[in-house]
Amino acid sequence: MTSHELLKQIKLLLTGVVADEGPSYFVEIVTSLSQIGNEEFQDTFDEFSKRPRFADFLRGLMGRSTQPKKRRDSDELMHDLTSFLASIDLKRYFISLTEYEFIVRDIDLNLQNTEVGTFRDHVGTFAKKMETYIRKESLSTIYEVLEAAEEISRDFRILNNFRQFINNNLGRSSTAVTGEGELSLFLTSKTDYQQLLEKLQSLRVIYEELCSLFGVSSKEIPLEIGKVESGSLWIKVFGESRVISAMISLVESTVHFLHRNFTNEGRIMALPRRIESVTSFLELEQKLKEAGMDTSELKEYIKKSSVLIGRNLTQLLSGEAKVEVNDNVYSLGTELEQVYLAQAHRFLLSDSDDAPDSDDKV
């Protein structure tokens, strides 16, 4: 497993959703219950770390405290808790809980060998405590829900710290600096040593060829590698912003072309090799014009560059049933992936001159 895959799975546990659309309702509920104490009643939660059980502490605080401030704080805490619990949309909660339980069950993390080895148990405990609270609302059931939420919140903090550790220690974790663009490319197929070198070489050729078209010195602004992990290939590179933007667009359109033609034709194809066809497909002249470049004297060079770039895009992306480009996922879907990968093996073993191509335009 690459650190990219590991980070995605940790993010899935922390948010409960695949896309960047905010946390799931279940995660919102757990987080909110914990924040009620952590943000508004920090003194109360500080005491928790000194006690064996949070529920016992709160029960004692509510029942026996004679100090006006503590009594007032505990009254406010219980008011916030009961108000929040009463506001929960139960139908939405149970749907979100079921979805999250599937995530926790299927996640490919060996949680048993980590500090969050009881994470699945904590989720199950919270679900049971919420069911008990829903059936019988009482001081005791509120305590138990809050305690169960705090256990999951603690797991979240451990996972988040683990994610930060990975980001800080496995390659350049910062985003592109001023004037730079960033391309993060994740190819899920298994790559051997030779394929890895060829794909890295293809990226370099594409970048340098685009630099020439954009009037950028690839020596002054080289393609900088921020991260490379093999097996499934994850590479993060930084370079001149306009060039990287063009690379991202070309990679995305190429993946779309290769996947669409496989779906329609049932076989893997290379990008068109005819000069007119590949020039039309890549639309390099249009990309240069959009960047404010005068292309009147570049037309022949654009045609030659299109052929070279097209060949290297095919080398980089052929045989990839699932590709992630800066967190955007392009996939054939589970049913077609195995068929595609089987054909990809034969395609990559064949002579590239004999490989099928297409003059189709996206």
Image: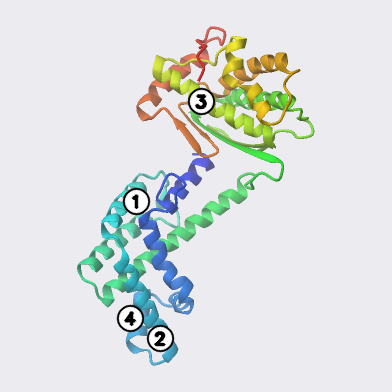
Residue 255: give its label: 3
Residue 59: give its label: 4
C-alpha gap between disc 4 and disc 2:
14 Å
Nearest the camera: 341 or 327? 327
Residue 72: give its label: 2
Work out whether mark 4 precedes mark 2 in sequence or the reverse, and give the earlier one. Answer: 4
Amino acid type for the residue under numbered disc 2: Arg
Work out whether mark 3 precedes mark 4 in sequence or the reverse, and give the earlier one. Answer: 4
Left or right of 252? Residue 52 is left
Left or right of 226? Residue 215 is right
Amino acid type for the residue under numbered disc 4: Arg
Amino acid type for the residue under numbered disc 3: Val
Nearest the camera: 266 or 1? 266
- Kindly indicate the quadrant of the structure image that contains residue 137: bottom left
Left or right of 196? Residue 299 is right
Residue at image position (71%, 13%) is: 300
Residue at image position (66%, 22%) is: 285
Of tags 3 and 4, the one toward the viewer is: 3
C-alpha gap between disc 4 and disc 1:
30 Å
Amino acid type for the residue under numbered disc 1: Tyr
C-alpha gap between disc 1 and disc 2:
36 Å
Left or right of 123? Residue 131 is left
Nearest the camera: 228 or 362? 362
